[in-house]
Image: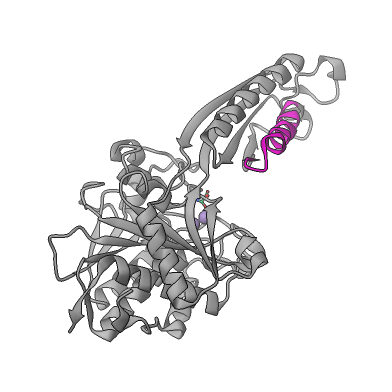
Amino acid sequence: MPASHSNLQIDSERLWGTIHETAAFGATPKGGVRRLTLGPEDKQVRDWFRRACEAAGCEVHVDALGTMFALRRGRDMSKPPLGIGSHLDTQPTGGKFDGSLGTLAALEVVRTLNAAGIETETPLCVINWTNEEGSRFAPAMMASGAYAGDFTADDILGRNAAEGITVAQALSEIGYNGDEPVGARRLGGFVELHIEQGPILEAEGKTIGVVHNGQGIIWYDGRVTGFASHAGTTPMPLRRDALATFAEIVLAVERIARELGPDAVGTIGETTIENASRNVIPGDLTFTIDVRSASAATLDKFDIMLRKVFAEIATRRRAEVALDQIWRKEPPQFDARLVDAVETAAKELGYSHRRITTGAGHDACNLATVMPAAMIFVPCKDGISHNELEDATQADCAAGANELLHTVLALAGVAGRD
Ligand code: HGY
Ligand code: MN
Ligand code: MN
């Protein structure tokens, strides 16, 4: 960290105000935020973000998947910008901090540099990645995945939401179908601030998490096909009950995760009984599975065990169980030089810190496959996230933003004061 700026601090009140001002877009009665990607509330926060970045002197560019790049010029514009940011979309019952903290803290870094009249050597780019959550459109971290080359933009533009609208239609409806080709904007690296979304930092009383690796993810779409028949006249031994079959599947996922744990988790987050009726034995249902581990070998084992157990359940229950892997993300490794820069900044700022693995997926996990990337975590209350109760303290948010500021100064260099 350049000595001349070691005492530079972000404006904690301004950041806290920004977090709460934007939380109004999609605010829920329970104090959370429902801002599904590319919906009307996402448009509101995007428009706000564009205005705020332009007011901070940035040029805002939008790519074909709606990702927003707010460019702050540096002294040497021949260098690819250092990317900072996160996402502004949320889960259906999301909170005020997941994604918002990282995106708004990146804006706060720019505002702080502006106020201090500091020009960085390398340009900066504050980024709002489209559809990190993957709730309305699969997969999660969708736009950063396309930027990293995991998907083509056309593939993603054709993805459907449950309500039958495509990504392309949703982008056009909110006016964020940008003309910049996905991946065309070169970045020299990416640093993302995020709440931990887990209990470790809070439990250990640490302010900063220096994220050095993460979990790989597999997403499946599943279908159980039994036989719909009369709830009153079908004897129990003759039933091919899709829901009872599914019940065994749910417990099998939990058992396999526990067996392969602690470095394995498995979740069935969605299920739909088709043509459900209280006096019809369920014949068809669909479901999703989310499997994670920081070990690729464990992911492989999980997949093999799932398929074996599901086949046994299907045979015994005379049902069909289909499992379609729709997404696999290998466990990310973050860049040693950038991770060291985060750790050094924490030491120099005097923040208690520890190295940590991210259990959640993040856009930085995708970026790490194509450029140097790192993440900074701060604690959240009781480790709760993807829940309207999600909460964090102003002090921890400020510490995270200061940590981001000084990591940026170390990586982007200071060209001088205006
Ligand atoms: O699923 C995830 O880990 C991220 O929160 N979208
Ligand atoms: Mn997030
Ligand atoms: Mn999330």
Picture quadrant of residue 71: bottom left
Q: Position of residue 350 (x, y in %)?
A: 49, 77
The residue lying toward the viewer, choosing from 191 and 91, is 191
Query: Is residue 306 one of those drawn in magenta?
Result: no
**Is 143 situated above or below 256?**
below
Quadrant containing the N terminus in the rendered view? bottom left
Q: Which residues are magenta?
A: 245-266
Residue 131 in view, yes or no:
no
The quarter holding residue 411 reads bottom left
Which of the two residues, 239 or 314, is positioned nearer the viewer here?
Answer: 314
**x 43%, y 56%: residue:** 39
User: Measuring 63% from the left and 70% from the top, which residue is drawn there?
Assistant: 205
User: Could you tell me which quadrant the C terminus lies in?
Assistant: bottom left
Foreground pick, 324 / 237: 324
- Please say which color scheme the image uses: one colour
| Residue at position x 21%, y 66% in the image | 123
Q: Residue 265 location in percent, x, y?
A: 63, 42
User: Where 261 falls versus 135 (above or below)?
Assistant: above
What is the total number of numbered labels drawn onto the structure image? Answer: 0
| Residue 107 visible (yes or no) | yes
Q: Position of residue 52 (x, y in %)?
A: 31, 75
Q: Which quadrant holds residue 274?
A: top right
Q: Give the vertical position of 117 relative to 265 (above or below).
A: below
Q: Which residue is painted at 85% across and 24% down in the image?
A: 232
Task: Give the x, y percent position of residue 343.
Answer: 44, 65
- The verdict on residue 251 being magenta is yes
Q: Main secondary structure of the magenta part?
A: helix
